[in-house]
Amino acid sequence: MNGKFSKIKIAIITCCVIGLPNVVMSSELLNHKAKATGIMSVDDIDSMDSGFVETAQANTSLEAITIEELRISKLQILLDRTGVSPGVINGRKSEYLKRALNVFSEKKDKLIMLNDNDAIDQLIGEAEQEPFSYYKITKKDIAGPFVEKIPERIQDQGSLKSLTYRSLKEKLAENFHMDEAFLLRLNPDADFDKIGTKLKVANVGRNLSTKVVSIKADMNSRLLSAYDAKGKIVAIYPASIGSAQNPSPRGTFKVRNKAGFPKYTLSPSNTFELIDDGLPVVVASGPNNPVGIAWIGLSKKSYGIHGTPWPSRVGEAGSHGCIRLTNWDAMELAKLVSTGIEVVIE
């Protein structure tokens, strides 16, 4: 099964799991030639741009960005490029960022503390690329399409033909791995409805290619670590791993399948949303789909690693039992794994 995706159909039992009679990609969502329908091959998913995801609605406050926030955002961008994902780039310190910096320090064999501004400034100054770049809004950007209103209940989302972005602001924020509110604060006078508007954005450019042969998800640290054949870390991702109400299973499992832009089937037997008419609900694909833009199914029935419509909540809020990553991290990991590899949840 390592060569191609198989046709899969998964019933939701305890967590947010997808039903996949087919996988749909939209040319509006990808910057390359895409199929309208059908199961994607490994080559398809490996050629996809992992930068598209769906974020939470932005805070309308446009307070000026502080020097501290600017420093931290530059650090987050640097980590993002090296495979130590900071999650959303938002200029904020957090326990996860501290853990991510510790991992980065181990890889560099140099201790760097999050509260050591001089060391962080030196690290940023030594980077080969500038932390920020500029992007001009295009006619295609403004054309969308967008879905302005997405129902909160999953069963009500079944009436939508696509769960694409709510707005251009969301799409661009996610394209550049940024929190939407931070993007707006970085560009307080920008007109997002005007072609040619110049935006300051995170200069992300992560392009990992080393194959992942094992994965470990740590519930306590809320980290997902991916390893190569020599046991070296390929990538680290912040993760939401179950919750008190819907804990993730502990143990050793295998990757059973993977898919890009999956549809989602809400089963009447799910444990988190009572369906009004008691019938299964199929939700269209897209970055606002409940499992985001990528799915990695595990040998434990109904569980997997996947994206999310709310990347700002990853590592902070719990999940319905599965392992949630930001959409761009989930897509990147899906490119790097093959079916049959080991996944340990502890």
Image (cartoon, rainbow, N blue to C red):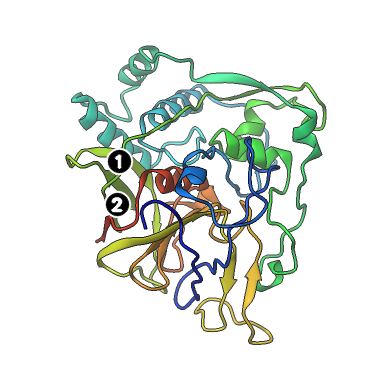
Q: Which residue is mark 2?
A: 221
- Can residue 295 be seen in the rendering of this structure? no
Residue at horizontal 58 percent and vertical 77 percent from the top? 273
The disc placed on residue 99 is 1
- Tell me the quarter of the image containing the N terminus: bottom left
Q: Position of residue 200 (x, y in %)?
A: 63, 22
The C terminus appears in which quarter of the rendering? bottom left
Occupied quadrant, residue 339? bottom left
Sequence order check, earlier mark of 1 and 2: 1
Give the vertical position of 219 relative to 198 (above or below). below
Q: Amino acid at mark 1?
A: Arg
Report helix, strand or loop for mark 1.
helix
Residue 86 percent across, percent down from the top left: 42, 38
Q: Is residue 329 left or right of residue 35?
A: left
x and y percentages locating residue 278 in the rendered image: 63, 87
Residue located farthest toward the bottom when viewing the structure as drawn: 278
Q: Is residue 143 visible?
A: yes
Q: In the rendered structure, find residue 137 and report the number of the disc placed on it.
A: none
**Left-right relation of 280 to 319:** right
